[in-house]
Amino acid sequence: MNEATFYEQWGPVARRVLRAGHFARFVAKTSLGLRPSLLVELRWRLGDEIMALPIFEALRRKWPHARVEVLTNQPDLFMDHPFVDAVNPAAPSPDVYYLLRGAPHDVHRLTHYAREAEVPVPDARPRLYYQDWSSPLLHELPEGDGPLIAIAPGASWSTKRWPADSWRSLARELEARGCRVFEVCGAGESVGLACSFAGRTTVREAAVLLHAAQAVVASDSGLMHLARAADAPVVALFGPTDPALLIGDDGGVQRLGNGRACAGCWNAGRMRTPGQCPIGEPDCLSTISVEQVAGRVWTALGRG
């Protein structure tokens, strides 16, 4: 994903002139007590944009009277957002511009975003602010009284994915314990559950379904981050990435690593090509057992 940034639509000389003019206007507005305009550009992958969400509250604290606008690929994340005034404005003309896209592999993501936005590192975790958590899709969820468990088996890299047979075995194990299980994922990522929303949801609809679950089991993916932003307890499976750099100390996430000596190879700089195992291991997460995951789900449900 190499979408041009806001300033890249102009040449290098024009960019310097625009930045200087915007800064001068910011100084003039603040000195006159006028309302400055802040533009935050994300326009990246779902998980990356979700990890940046706490920055907006921090910006509001720093600039309580500023107008905050965002350029995003995921406008559903900003529905009813109390700290954002405009989403994808047609003709932005910011006084201050922040680009929050990507991060160094070895730096805690939220810490990096805070540095780029020149705010203290937020204490809050990412969250959605929907006033309406309803959707017709909720009527398709399995009926019954048992705990409702969502699984999100998809991931952008094959090295982040648990084997499909393991997902199916987990679903059977949870159903044997009285749980109601459904899957949320992209088209082509289904593991074949009877209740599947594969490729059928918008970001908001996926968030609503995950919000309805008593626990979510997910690969390291955008849906893992979306589940936590939707306030669902999460059991997350990790292999090439380091959860400490992505989700920090969020107590609502049960982390399960693959137990390999090479775990976290992407963040450690050993994975040279994104998603490609440096040692040629075909199933990075295959060392994680169904029993381990089911046990963590039971813990997330508060059942020991």
Image (cartoon, helix red, strand yellow):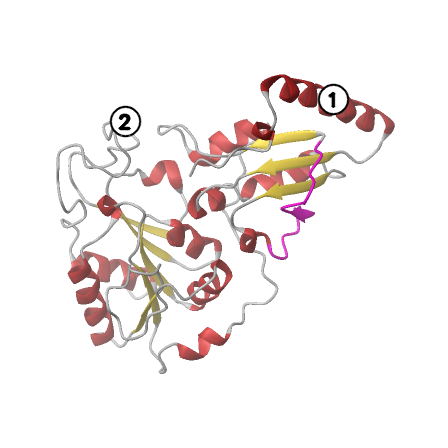
SS at circle 1: helix
> Vertically, is 197 above or below 35?
below
Which of the numbered marks, if any, corresponds to residue 269? 2
Which of the numbered marks, if any, corresponds to residue 225? none
Residue with the mark numbered 1: 21
Question: Which of these two is toward me, 26 or 177?
Answer: 26
| For discs 1 and 2, the disc positioned in front in the rendered view | 1
Looking at the rendering, the stretch of residues picked out in magenta corresponds to 79-94
Question: Which of these two is toward me, 254 or 59?
Answer: 59
Image spot of residue 7 (x, y percent):
60, 28
Residue at 61% in and 26% down: 10
In the image, is residue 80 part of the stretch drawn in magenta?
yes
Work out which quarter of the rendered image holds the C terminus and state it. bottom left
Q: Is residue 9 visible in the rendered structure shown here?
A: yes
> Vertically, is 92 above or below 31?
below
Query: Does residue 213 appear left or right of residue 208 in this picture?
Result: left
In the image, is residue 275 part of the stretch drawn in magenta?
no
Residue at 59% in and 52% down: 78
Q: Is residue 252 visible in the rendered structure shown here?
A: no
Check disc 2: other Cα within 10 Å, few if <14, some if 14-19, many if 20+. Answer: few
Image spot of residue 59 (x, y percent):
64, 37
